[in-house]
Every structure is written in structure tokens, then in C-alpha cells.
Image (cartoon, rainbow, N blue to C red):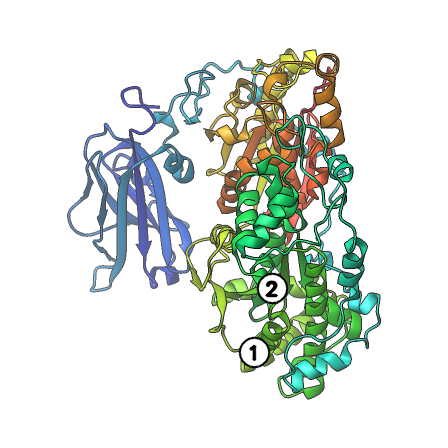
Amino acid sequence: MASSGGISDQLFVSVKLESPRLAELDLDPHLFGSHPVAGSWDPCKALPLERAAAALWDLSCVVPSQHEPLDFKFVLKQKNDSSQCIVEEGPNRSLGCQSNEVEMRSAVFKLDEGNDVLECKIQVETEMLSPFDLAASWRTHQEYLQPSTVRGAHDVTINTGLEGRDKNGFASGLELDLEKYVVPTPNMGSGVVYAANLTENPRSLLQTGSSSNNDTTKDILYNSTKGDSSPNHYAKTMKGATEGHEPSLEEHRAMFVDRGVGSPNFGRPTKETFSVSNFKLDSEAKGRKNALEAFSFLPIDKVGESCYQQDMPAAEGAVAAAAVADQMYGPKEDRKLAIVLVGLPARGKTFTAAKLTRYLRWLGHETKHFNVGKYRRLKHGTNQTADFFRGDNREGVEARNEVAALAMEDMLSWMQEGGQVGIFDATNSTRIRRNMLMKMAEGKCKIIFLETICNDKHVLERNIRLKVQQSPDYAEQTDFEAGVQDFKERLAYYEKVYEPVEEGSYIKMVDMVSGKGGQLQINDISGYLPGRIVFFLVNCHLTPRPILLTRHGESMDNVGGRIGGDSSLSEAGQLYSRKLASFVEKRLKSERTASIWTSTLQRTILTAHPIIGFPKIQWRALDEINAGVCDGMTYDEIKKSKPEEYESRKKDKLRYRYPRGESYLDVIQRLEPVIIELERQRAPVVVIAHQAVLRALYAYFADKPLEEVPNIEIPLHTIIEIQMGVAGVQEKRYKLMDAVHPTAGL
């Protein structure tokens, strides 16, 4: 960065220009001024403002804080003739150095010799940058930033210079045909999969027959009978399997594996080997005391794990601690959570439900997505016209309420069997429907309504067309425009009866799909898990962008088969770093706001070094799994010198924690901020990290069960491109070169 002050000595400038009338004219706003940053008063070099909305243009840039006060003005240019300029009237604007300020002064332009004047609202904000501010706002001015270095580097660096680059030896000399390197994707197809098709299959329709719950459903809907009276044979079967049998001491000990969560003698019990049915998980001190005494032979930190394992998420750290606290002190129904979606069609409910399900599963919470539309299609077919959804069509209303009740029954049955969070995906657009769901859930789970509201006509039109394109409801519709018209009629029927949520606990997402503002309104939300859900939703949006995941180039420890360490790159690893730079420069050449994320270990920093023109951010959270006392060893050495550790890891690779090191579940916990930031980013991100870390990140995007995380294949010298957008998650893999040596896998 600037030699005198480091990375913080950068002034961030944000300029916004608003004018509804300008949108109608064939003119583009620019900024020019007295400094090279602003074009040196040369209109040909003026910086264009980018159009952010129908009547809004903006520009963000970074300038060194040591500059002289910057004078500038706004200028309008003809789209097809940049030589024709209209400079704003009045005195020059001025920016000082090392200042945090906001200026609100309109810009006035004379459009002709007469009295035709255009007035534009202007907002100019300046502030000194922190490292992450720079990464988020970087647009231009690469000439003021120095190349990155491996040791002693700032957390954020940008290498933008071509100096020192060998003409033929570096990335610019490596011509890559991206498609030439595409390899088959092992887990995710290239086609778009409708998110609702990936939801829980309706067992009430597929297993017990579609008419088994009709009487109960009608009672709830039309006679206001309290709750759901149908028996739950699944829960009874589970309960019967454990009643009347108290595990012996030998059986208790048999359920442990060595080194599961940090003790050489005791590990985490699994749900398959043990469940507690003869201890009441209530808030009475006496009940807790009896439970603790019954497990007095266990270390105290394991008592809580054993007693409450039945509802414990498969997680570590804060997630596990919060689960224990909620179960010991919270009401029984609060241990189960139902997120009930509310909203008109084409408001992103299914997309939001799918993302939330994936996030909670990844954190270790037993979560399932129940889509009522899937139930409706199985019971009533996919060829229902818009008339089926009319509010005055009693048969249609009864049919839709019936399948909603069936889906709710399935979700509650699943919760009684051990499920923790159910995502109930439907319009649920009337108070009658929502009251029905609350009665069914009474005493069984806590309900939080999640309402999605969108008022942007452009977003709605896009969503409607995507819905018709992807939904099975229109799979047999050969006339696409006719399908769009039918869906709009369906939407109009829903709008007539729609009643916004005003009851109970709720979260409202208002115009948040673009990630550029909007509102998140919450009411009566408390507890660890609801809080995490709110935090996640705040950072979600639909902006399409790619995320590129790759391991570092082959390291010297890879060559020697050693785990962990902080070695440099082998010759093959250095070649990969140059090929990766060429790939990134070609793949993201039009993405000025992309960024490169690495760990703090030198093999990832060295791999990123040849990449120019993008901010590079080092994350400690992206460091490889900590192998503790086994760091730097080969697996043969571990097997010989620490056979117990070797076998314990082999038994439960997910939960096994290296002595004074980490487990895969620990890694997932520290990666949560990375996932949140990846969701929040609207620009492409290249993540250069390590095998265990990338396994955990990839599992999130691919929605892989936690048990599969330690065995996901993340080969060296391969780029996994994850495409994030309204169509869901798609994957593409590029293999730039083969690894020369076999690699160690943590």
C-alpha cells in the first residue's frame, strides 16, 4: 500500500446521483476533477457512474489520504458522442484528506441555451478505510497499491502491477482455454433442479395413503378442533424400542469412541447407539439432579452430552452449548422449531427455505424442508389451472388446506422422531390457515412465521418467468407465455385474500432479495437458534455470482505426505499458481469487484501471489484443520507412534479431535463467518484454502450430510466453481493440471 501509512491510509469516496428525468435522456453522468483519479479535468478520462437503479447512479473509489484537496465536478455525456459534454453549474466541489463527511448538494445542468435546467440530487460520502472496507469497495486506482508479499503482508493486499512479470513465464504468457479444462462434476448435475423437488417426500401420501388423515384434517379446518388427534405410530415405534430397558455400565462404555471430543477415554455418543427415554428434559432441578446422578460415572462435561443427546445437534462449540442450555432451561416446545413461510407466489419463499435448510443442516441442526406444493402435486396432479387457486373456490380451498395439514402432520411426526427444525414452505396467506397450523403445533413445537415481501416489479417479473420455467406445475405447458399468464392469474387470486402476518413470532423480509437495502422486521424473537436464523437472513440475497474454490498448489509437505505444517510450494505448485492466475484473470476479467481469499499459511499466499488486479484477503478462519501434536507427521508415523489416535480417527473422522488440535466439527464452527460473508458478497470470490476447510465449505453449498464431509474429494490443482443465484446452486469443475505426488489428506 502507500509506503507512509499502510493499508489504512486510504480514503473511500462514495458518490450517488439521483434524477428520475435523467433516466429518460440519452445522457450518462461522469465525474472529473483536478487529480488523476478524477481525470485531471480531461472529460475524456472522466470516471463514469454506474447505474444502480432506474433513477440512481453511483461510483465508489479509493484515493490515497496524502493527496492534495481534490476539486471535482459532475459532467453529462451523450451515450454515442462522448465529446459532447454538459458540465454542472456553480463552483467546484472539494474533498479534503483524512476526512469522514457527507455532502448533500444538488448538481444543476443547463441542457440548452434556454431555460431547460436539470437538477440532480447528489450525495458524496468519504471515510477512512479499514482493510475490509477496502475489499468491499475497491473499484479503481490500482496505481497507488503495491504488490503483495508473503511474509509481513497486510490482511488485505492488491497486486496490480505488471512490473517484474516475466514475459513468457507468468500468467500472462499462459493462454488457457477454460472449457478445455472442464471435468465431470461428481455430485451436482449441470441442469437446474427445482428447489421444491429436493424437499422431504410426503410419507402421509406415499406410505399411508392419501385418505388416512382426511377426517382429522376436516375437523381442524372446519370444526376448530384443538390440535392434531391422529396417532403417531412412528413416535410410538421409536419409544417402544427403548422403554423398559436401562443401559448397563458396559453398554454405556461401549458407545464411546476414543478422542471423539477431546478426552482420550470418552467420546461423543451417537444417536444410533444411544437415546434417553427415561429422563424428563424439563426445567425442574430435581429432574436434572437425578439425571446427573444416573450418569455420575461420566466426566461432568460428558453428562450433558449423554443426557441430552436425543435432541443434540451433531455440532461443537456454540451450537452444542446453546442446545444444552435451551433443553435444560427452555420450555419443552421450544426445543423444536417450525419456520413457517408466508408470502405471495414468486416472492422467493422456496429459495429462502432451501438456503435456510442448507445452512442449519451444515451447522449440525437436524433440519428438513417440507414443501406443500409437492404434496398438492402428488395428490391432485400438476395440471391445475389458476381457477383451482381462487379464494371463492371452496373445493380448491379445502383441497389446499388438506394437503397443508398433511404436510404439517408429517413435519410434527418427524420432529417427534428426533428432528429439530422444520421448514414449512407454502403461501400460508390467510390467518385461518396460520391459526390451523398453530393449533396443530400447540405443545409440540415453537412456530416462527417467515414472511417474504417483494414490491419490485422487475424482480417479480423475473421470478414469475423463472417459476414457470422450473416448476413442475408447468412442465406440460408447451406455450411458455400462456403459462406466464396463468401464473399471473393465480397470483391475482392470492392477492385478493392475502393477509400479512401480525400474529405470534415472526420475521418479515421486505424487499431484501437484491441485497441492496430492504428491511428485516422481527417480533417476539429470542433464543440462540432464532437469533442465528435472523443473522443469516440479514445477509442473504439473490444476486448471481460465482464462488471459486481451490486448494493451494502442491506444497513440499504434500510431496512428503506430511499433514499440516506451513511449507512452501513445490515446482508443480508454483506452476499451478501461475496457471491459476491466468485462469482467474480470464474468468473474472470483467469483474472489477472480485476478491481473493486465502488462509494465513504461506502455501495459499504463494498460490495467490501471481494473481493481479484483485484484493487479497487473509482469513485465519481458512487455515487448515489443526492437527495438534500430529502436525508435520505422516499417517504411517501416526500409526506407529500413536496407534490409539490413528484408530480413533478411523472410527469417527467427523468428530475426532487431534490432541491439542481440532475436529472437522470445530472447523465448521470457525467457518461460519466465512459462509455468512460468502452469502453477503455480491461480487465473485476466489477461495484458496486447504483440503479439510474446502471439504467443509463445499458441503455447505452442495448440501452434503455432515457425516460425508471428511471424505469429500477435493483434488489438488482443480477449481470448483459454485454459481450462486436465483436458480439455486450449480457447479462446474476445472482441472488445470495433475498432481505429481500423492497428497496427504487431513
36 on left or right of 463: left
Mark 2 and mark 1 lie on one chain; the one further toward the N terminus is: 1
> Which residue is depicted at the point 58% across and 33% down?
667
Q: Secondary structure at mark 2?
A: loop
Residue 135 position by quadrant: top left
Q: Tell which of 313 and 185 is nearer to you.
A: 313
Q: Which residue is mark 2?
A: 445
Three-letter residue code for mark 1 = Thr
Q: Amino acid at mark 2?
A: Cys
SS at mark 1? loop
Percent of width and height locating residue 394? 68, 87
Name above or below for residue 707 compared with residue 480. Answer: above
Q: Which residue in the structure is indicated by mark 1?
A: 430
Label 2, label 1: how far apart the Cα atoms are:
21 Å
Marker count (numbered) = 2
Q: Position of residue 21 (x, y in %)?
A: 33, 63
Q: Residue at x 68, y 26 (%)?
A: 736
Q: Where is residue 638 drawn, in percent x and y?
A: 71, 15
Residue 159, image x and y in percent?
Answer: 44, 24
Task: From the viewer's perspective, tell me whether residue 694 is left or right of residue 599.
Answer: right
Q: Is residue 441 above or below residue 59?
A: below
